[in-house]
Image (cartoon, helix red, strand yellow):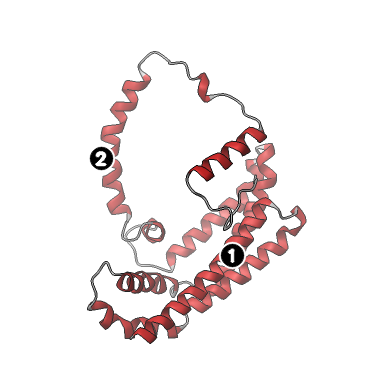
Amino acid sequence: MEAKYQELMDRYREYHDLESVVSVLDWDQAVYMPEGGGPARARQLALVSRIAHEKFVDPEFGRLLDELQPWADTLPDDSDEAALIRVARIEYERATKIPAAFVAEHYEHANLLFQAWEKARPENDFAALLPLMEKQLDYSRRTAEFFAPYEHIMDPLIDFNDYGMTVGTVRPLFEQLRGRLAPLVEEVTSRAPVDDACLKQTFGEAEQWAFGLEVARAIGYDFERGRLDKSA
């Protein structure tokens, strides 16, 4: 089983390496890429995200998961191997429900939306973004439809970010928070205003940059493996 597990790891690593390529292209778009490169970058991101998705949903990946499952069942739940197989199966079964062509199409639109936002932001021009935002909302609806039937259309979308959570589990949680937070907010806002001038100061770019570097170094960020750059 160790050989099969290693093969699964190799395939999983290849998929995540391609996802990392997408992240680097995203990062470059946000910090260094000239404005004129936007349309080509959107196509590049769509292409790499489609290739990554196609590699991940290869039936061979599913076959490996099936063959490794009996072995994983004999391992402690918190072992690295059992945990990886468990998470990989969740991600694989989720990914197989979404066509690769849709992934590419959605990713291309999301990046065109980001480029439009960069232009609209300085002018606070929400109207320019509205058609693209509406199309993005439609992509979210279409994504959810791949996971029908569901009790609420948000259930599949919440599950992407918090596995196992649904509208049915989130709403009671929010109700509990509302019951405790609303009185607290009311009590705070009923008091005399405090001096909040310290929250409304202006700092120059150089000072912000220096502070960002100081914080990154303080938490042990390794600048041999990453960097800090300016974005919109």
The image quadrant that residue 103 belongs to is bottom right
Please name whichever residue, 222 or 44, is drawn nearer the observer in this view of the structure: 222
Secondary structure found at label 2:
helix
Label at residue 22 = 1
Please name whichever residue, 100 or 210, is drawn nearer the observer in this view of the structure: 210
Q: Is residue 33 above or below residue 118?
A: below
Relative horizontal placement of residue 131, taking residue 3 as reference (left or right): right
Label at residue 64 = none
Q: Is residue 209 above or below residue 5?
A: above
- Within 10 angstroms of label 1, few (less than 14), some, or many (20 or more) residues? some
Which callout, 1 or 2, points to the residue nearer the camera?
1
Position of the C terminus, as image quadrant, is top right
Farthest residue to the right: give it. Answer: 36
**x, y (%) of residue 192?**
39, 13
The answer to whether residue 99 is seen in the rendering is no
The image quadrant that residue 77 belongs to is bottom left
Residue type indicated by callout 1: Val
Label at residue 176 = 2
